[in-house]
Image: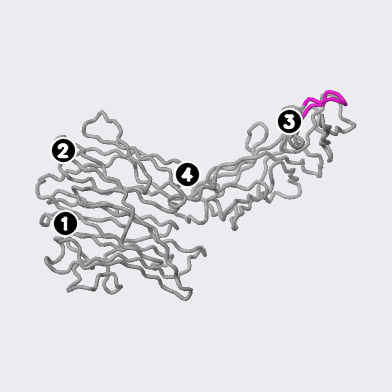
Amino acid sequence: MRWICTDFDIVGGWDIGGRTFEVSVPEETNRLVMFFGSCCFVEVQNAKPKEDQGWKMITEIDLNKVRQDGLPNSSPVTSPIPVQLYPQGCEYRFIIPVHDPDGDKHRCRDTDENQHECYTGGKNRDLCGKLPKITIHSDCTLVFDTNGPPGDYAVRVIIEDLDDNNEPLSKISLSFLLRISPDITKCETPSIKEPERHCKTIPVGKLYETKIVADAANKDKPIFRIEINKPNGMKSSSLPSADPLRKAIKLTWRPTTDQIGTHIVGFFAVDTAGITSGWSYVNLNVADAGYLYPVKSKSFPTEGQVVDIGRTNRWSIRFNRQVRPPTQPAYITLMNYYDRVVGRVDSSNNTQVDFSGRNVFFEMRIDEVAGELPYTLSIDEGFAIDAAYGDSTCLFYSKAEEWKITIEEPLGSVTPLAVTKAHPTKLIPIELPIVECHQDNVDINIPSDAADGDECFIHLSEESFVVTSQNRIRVPYKFCCSTTCYE
């Protein structure tokens, strides 16, 4: 097994790295199992000494399983955990890092020989099943009883994601060591103060920054270092601290295209006695740099469109990818020219919206239609989430967007009410063809009934211009013919 090394500790005798490889699966394959195994774990205290203490890493995917949402399943993701050193005679707890990209429920459990999760090439299988001094709860909380003799203790965990019937969709394994120190009499360990555990989606190429802060438990044993299991390319730098018992570092990372997917960044603090804080982590989901966004030209109403609310108030927003509703309220809001809200729809409320593929359908009930002024359709960030990322806590949200529209008066009015300036005197749409290009100038066809002071518009989404005479007009922007522009 070869990998790119991202972190190591000469004193602790460990290194961490990662590698990606592809597997071609025959079409008739129903169940995919991949594993690595070896006869010899290091000597540990919770297995029989001088006998085979083999280990096995296993990944299993049942290709017969079909997700309820019809999307392909993604296995849970975890993180390698370096050796953790704890004082003797205490009980310690920490959370095994697990993230499921689909948002599926997951559980942790001991290995099971009957499910072929144990190494079978040696004399016994002591490192299988329930291991002494180690308790693994289904919520992935680990309890370590350090009342045993000093030395290393093995941990072997199976992590499964579950369908709606609590049946496994897939499973992965995790193995690591915990160590008991004989030299400590107090149950004091350093602690991680920042960051709180979180999950964040990062588009490719966007900078991610966070700060890790650790505090010592004893003034005689300050923080010596902070160890990090980080993805390739993530950089760390020390931060100044006025408190001698506190240490802080800054992490920065700009993920690349080949790092699309979920990454667990784990970290722990070590004091000068070698005692560790326990494993903490954050989840980072790297997504395609193309943001999830509304497509104006394929939505209804489109930018600048004239809407006759007397005929329909069934609207739709089209996105560039398949979407699903958010779990928290997010709104599309219709505001009049004076920024007063005249209509609002909550995309998290299934009685107000209908998600279908890339579209979100809804009815916009408008409180009033007032004046001959434009309306703004404003879409909150997170109005929809990318369906490919499921309902997990680490979502890829749609970005915020807004555009101008025009609303016709009900009762059959057919005159577009489009203008981008306040208090117009008269609005005149210009019929096509609107522009004639010449070598030295550009002609704009003005309606014969336009008079001085009238405001005309050509496209509903553009500014109006003011007529100053039948032959000359004052235009607030440029017209361009090929490479020549006229003001």
Q: Is residue 178 visible?
A: yes
Residue placed under numbered mark 4 in the picture:
205
- The stretch in magenta equals 464-474
Amino acid type assigned to the residue bearing label 3 in the image? Lys
> In whole angstroms, how far apart are the C-alphas of marks 1 and 3?
75 Å
Looking at the image, is mark 2 or mark 4 earlier in the sequence? 4
Say which element carries label 3: loop
- Give the percent coordinates (x, y) of residue 349: 55, 51
Viewer-side residue, 367 vs 148: 148
Q: Which mark is residue 221?
A: 2
The residue located at (40%, 42%) in the rendering is 253
Q: Are marks 2 and 4 in contact (CB under 8 Å)?
A: no
Q: Residue furthest right?
A: 448
Q: Is residue 371 visible?
A: no
Looking at the image, is mark 1 or mark 2 earlier in the sequence? 1
Question: Tag 3: Cα neighbours inside 10 Å, few (<14), some, or many (≥20)?
Answer: few
Amino acid type assigned to the residue bearing label 4 in the image? Gly
Amino acid type assigned to the residue bearing label 1 in the image? Asp
Residue placed under numbered mark 3 in the picture:
478
> In whole angstroms, how far apart are the C-alphas of marks 1 and 2?
23 Å
Would residue 151 be found to the left or right of residue 227 on screen? left
> In whole angstroms, how far apart are the C-alphas of marks 4 and 1?
41 Å
Q: Which mark is residue 438?
A: none
Q: Which mark is residue 152?
A: 1
Q: Nearer the viewer, mark 2 or mark 3?
A: 3
Question: Tag 2: Cα neighbours inside 10 Å, few (<14), some, or many (≥20)?
Answer: some
Quadrant in the picture for the C terminus? top right
Residue 40 occupies which quadrant of the picture? Answer: bottom left
Say which element carries label 4: loop
Q: Is residue 295 magenta?
A: no
The residue located at (20%, 48%) in the rendering is 10
Looking at the image, is mark 2 or mark 3 earlier in the sequence? 2
